[in-house]
Structure formats: structure tokens, C-alpha cells
Amino acid sequence: MKKARVLVIRFSAMGDVAMVASVLRELSAQHKQMELIMVSRPQFAAFFEGIPNLTFHPIFPDEQHKGPKGLWRLFNELKKYDIDYVADLHNNIRSRILTLFFKTAGYHLAILDKARHRKKELTRKRHKIFKPLRPTVERYADVFRNLGFSIKLKHRLQKEERPIPVVYQSLLGSEKIKIGIAPFAQHPYKVWKLSHWDTIFKTFPASTYSFFIFGGGKQESEIAARWSSQHPHVHSTIGQIGLTGELDLISHLDLMISMDSSGMHMASMVGTCCLSIWGATHPYAGFLGYGQSKEDCIQVEHPNRPSSIYGNKSCICNGVEAIDLVTPEMVLEKIRKTLPASRA
């Protein structure tokens, strides 16, 4: 009997793709006869390593797959997998063009409902409807349900057994409490004041704690390097071990602290608890990390929040940016409550 082959489409962004990986792990476990063809950007391939019966097919949207002609080329590449179903988990212009090719060719397909109207109601200034939206991971799962595949998401963290990156074996082998920090984000309205991290590092002594900084490019790497030079127990991973190595390292941490960003979703993938700091965005939009607790969200409630879904718009609350209402004391208190009492 031929296995059902499902083409799964999600090109970006990093956190959204990581959430897809969490759903596909559950889907694959519940449908062992299913084969998955995942189409995303090549830098995200590490998210899907280890998922049974999954083949990763990269898209190069700025090169051979650019524009309608490039997507037609991609369509012909993907047809060779002899797929049965198409699951569009992106629902943007590129994916809609691609799925149109498949629809015209007679394939069964289902497309993500982004609930754009509900999101506008949540983020508008006047007559805001402040109610939690359906979690994004459940919206992803709905696409497969619409294709006829049952799936029940557990919404629980599941610790994943992964190797320790060689470069960090001595640090992770110690008895110190290990905390990951993902302090950066694509949009400034989602970034907590960087000066606050000095307070965090100084509060937890080098004799007992180790901090690992994740995420970013050249500028962020320079900031992390400065922290490392000022605090002996702070270590930068930026540009050091690749995405697979970062996931390996996060799986061995006692705690992760992240903005509303991909760091939170990477922690979810490997079953590590994550404290998340929220400003212009809000967990009600449906982007809380898979299996993470709402109790671990650090935020200040205000009628102006949230101002946007993705954090690309300013959110002024009481005359200041919403993210700036989160104090170091709030984060310190949450860290102490989250770590085992005997160790914090």
C-alpha cells in the first residue's frame, strides 16, 4: 500500500518554521504511514532533522525559484515526489502561486487560515477585542485535518535527547545552573533594553551560573562578545555552532529566556522551559511557544497592547514603549520562581 505523501509549505519566518517542526513531529508520530516533503529555506533544514519519513526540499526564492517562473520551476521539482496532498502553512503570495499550480493540476490541497480579521480586531487602537486567538500550531494542525488527517496536539514540552556540542562539553558538564538568553529580535519593539541584562548577569554569580547568548548577526555578536568580556560566566554562541548545534545546546539548558522570537520556539522544539518577554506583541495572538506556559510570559498588561502581531509597530503605554515597562526585578523574580528552589 502506497504511503500518503504530503507536501508541506512554509518558507519563513524562523519562529514560524520552528513551530511547523513541532507540529510535524506530532503528526509523524500519529501517522507512521505518512511521508512528508517539507519545503522551506535551506537554513531551516536543521529544524526537521530526525522527523521520521520527512524529506526536506529547499527553496531559493532569490535565485532559481524567484518570481512566477522560478515557482513554476519549483513546482516541477516537487511533482517528482509523486505527492498526494499539499498543505500550505504559509498563505502568502509565493505559496499561493505555488498552490495554484498544484490546484490546477488536480492535487488535493488545504491552506492556512491566518485569521487576519481577528488579528486586526486584537491589535487595533479603538474597539479592540482583547480575546485569545487560536494558537498558530493548532491552525497548522487544522490544515492537515482539512486534508483528512486526524491530529491531536499534546501542547506539552517533551525533552529531546541530543548530543552536547563539543565546544561546550566542559561548561555543560559542570554543576552550574545553565541559562540560555535570546535577547535580540527582528523588530526593535520586541527587544528588552540591553542594559538590563547586565543586572541579570550580576545578580546570578559566576560560581553557580552559566549564561549562553543566542541569535543574531555581526552587530549582535559584538554585543554578546562585550558581555562575555565583562562577565566570565557569559558565553556567546552566535556564529559558533550552527543551528543544529544551538538546538543541541538548548536541550541541555535548565532554562531559556527569550523575547517573543525564534529563541522561544527553538526551546519548545527540544523541550526546554522558556521565560518569554513581551512588549508590542501579546501571547493572545497565538504565537506562544509550543508547550510553553502562559505563566512564564513576562509582560505588563495595558489597554494599548498589543499594537501588532509581529512587533513591527510601536506600542506606547503610559508614555513609554510597552517592552520598557518590563523591569529587571520582574525578570529576576520569574527566574527565581522558575528554577528549582534548591538551586536558585
Image (cartoon, rainbow, N blue to C red):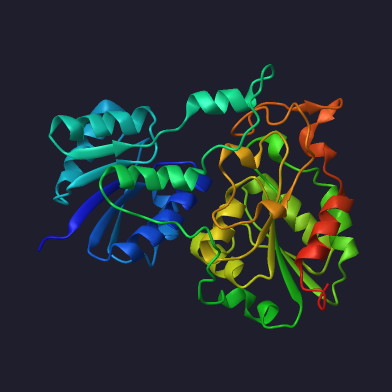
Does the image show residue 59? Answer: no
**Residue furthest out toward the top:** 126
Q: In the figure, 225 relative to 341: above or below?
A: above
Q: Is residue 3 left or right of residue 8?
A: left
Examine the rendered structure and indicate whether residue 15 appears above or below residue 118: below
Relative to 108, does residue 307 appear above or below in the rendering? above
Q: Quadrant of residue 156?
A: bottom right
Residue 254, position in %: x, y?
69, 70
Question: In screen coordinates, is 344 left or right of 54?
Answer: right
Q: Position of residue 323 (x, y in %)?
A: 77, 38
Question: In the image, what residue occupies the spot 12% across and 34% down?
Answer: 105
Which of 115/84 is in front?
115
Relative horizontal placement of residue 281, taking residue 204 as reference (left or right): left
State which quadrant residue 235 falls in. bottom right
Say which quadrant the C terminus sits in: bottom right
User: Which residue is found at the position 81% from the left and 43% from the top?
Assistant: 193
Q: Position of residue 286 (x, y in %)?
A: 56, 41
Quadrant location, the N terminus: bottom left
